[in-house]
Amino acid sequence: MLEQFVTVLPGTLGPALLVMSVSAMLRVGEGREKPRSSSWRLYGLIVGILGAVVFAALRASAVINQRTVVNYPTLVCCVIADIALFVVLINAKRTTSHWAEHPRRMDMANGIAAIALALTVFRALPDVILELTIFVEPGDPVFTSDMLLRALGFLLGLAASVIVAYIVRSLRSTAYAWSFNLAALILLVLVFVQHLTSLFTVMQSTGDLMLHGLTFKLLVWFINHGTPIIIAQLAVFLIPAVASIVAGFRMPLVGENNAVVRTHAAFRRRAKAAGVWTILAVIGVTVALTYGVAQTNKVPVLSPPESYSLSKDGDVATISFSQLADGHLHRFEYKAKDGTVMRFIIIKKNGGAYGVGLDACDNCGDAGYYEKDGKIICKRCDVAINLATIGFSGGCNPIPFPYQAGHGSITIQTSDLDALSSHFQS
């Protein structure tokens, strides 16, 4: 669940904040007094979402196996649209003031905004949508607790982006206008940096652009700091958040009558609440995208080896059934005759059978296996091993070796382990 959450949140947060910011800065009129182009931004958002769904479906079905064919022209258009949208937002106040006197300027602003939002959403959402294809592990039933947890993580990530954007939107009516506008412009600059970084990366891979020295190091820095840039897209709204709190404290609780006093008091509460909730949102997203990502990327540590009985002459290793009765993965260590330190694993399978093999495989070497959520997973390739196939050769399965099960224990001839010591020699 956490993995889906920290994948969906960064993929949707930036576009959600951009949609919110553009909508807030270009909103004018109510009902019939809205300009005819007021719905264009919504249409652009819908087109971007539908395009992203189609592109993701084509990628999932392998109809499109070269993403550069689509990404290259899309990123070029994104960069151009970002620049045009920046000009629109710089002039937003002049465009929206008395817009009825110059409706074509308003229409042009909404048209550019619609194109920019469509391109940004189309660019950002396919990878998020493709998360839907990994809800069910190969070979697993469709409806499992793991599938439901992945779906919940996906929905929570999507909901978090929308809720955070809604919280930030409340600052528009409480913070000083210049502070919100400044944050929106910085947000757009950060989105532009993301698009430009992706474009340069594609151009570098296709050979259309060759960066060297400082420029190449700068590109690598932006590529490696994608998560901090996403956090910064939200953190810029700390500017209007603080401004909103200041505005709340500065609002005097005096007026011509009680109604005015109550209005001022209500504004104080709303301004402080909007600022505090935005600060909490920034903290929450920062924690999610640092600690959460660190947890999902954390390299698992193999459990320590357990003790077992070794015959006096060292020819037979014995592990009692009672030691394995819990059905969990048990790891053991053995020093081969040539001095190689080896590991082997045993797990009690359904039906009372036992899965026995080296803590290594032919594909991934001696990286080992660990247990997570009832599954045995290869540490190197992160593949979940079918419990029923442990003890059989092939794929990423543990390398099997002979053993005997009976009389309350499993016995292993250490000569069989000695013969496989090369798998732990690197």
Image (cartoon, rainbow, N blue to C red):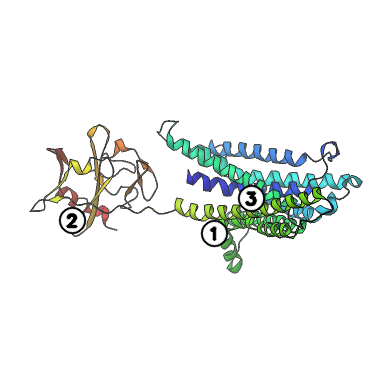
Task: Point out which mark residue 355 bears.
Answer: none
Q: What residue type is labelled 2?
A: Ala
Nearer-the-camera pick, 415 or 245: 245
Hey, which residue is sitting farthest left in the picture?
A: 312
Q: Nearer the viewer, residue 157 or 254?
A: 254
In-front residue for pair 395/69: 395
Kindly check if marks 2 and 3 are in contact, taking CB atoms under 8 A apart as contact.
no
Q: Position of residue 375 (x, y in %)?
A: 35, 41
Where is residue 382? Give x, y as percent.
40, 47
Residue 80 in view, yes or no = no
Where residue 320 sits, quadrant-wise, is top left
Q: Which of marks 2 and 3 is nearer the N terminus?
A: 3
Q: Which amino acid does label 1 sit on?
A: Asn
In this image, 425 relative to 46: left or right?
A: left
Residue furthest bottom as drawn? 214
Q: Which mark is residue 224?
A: 1
Kindly identify the amino acid type of the residue bearing the numbered disc 3: Gly
Q: Which residue is drawn at 20% across and 44% down?
A: 323
The residue carrying mark 3 is: 14
Number of the label disc, if any, that sits on residue 336:
2
Q: How far apart are marks 1 and 2 (CA)?
A: 43 Å
From the top left corner, tell me how far across and down residue 378 is, in percent: 35, 47
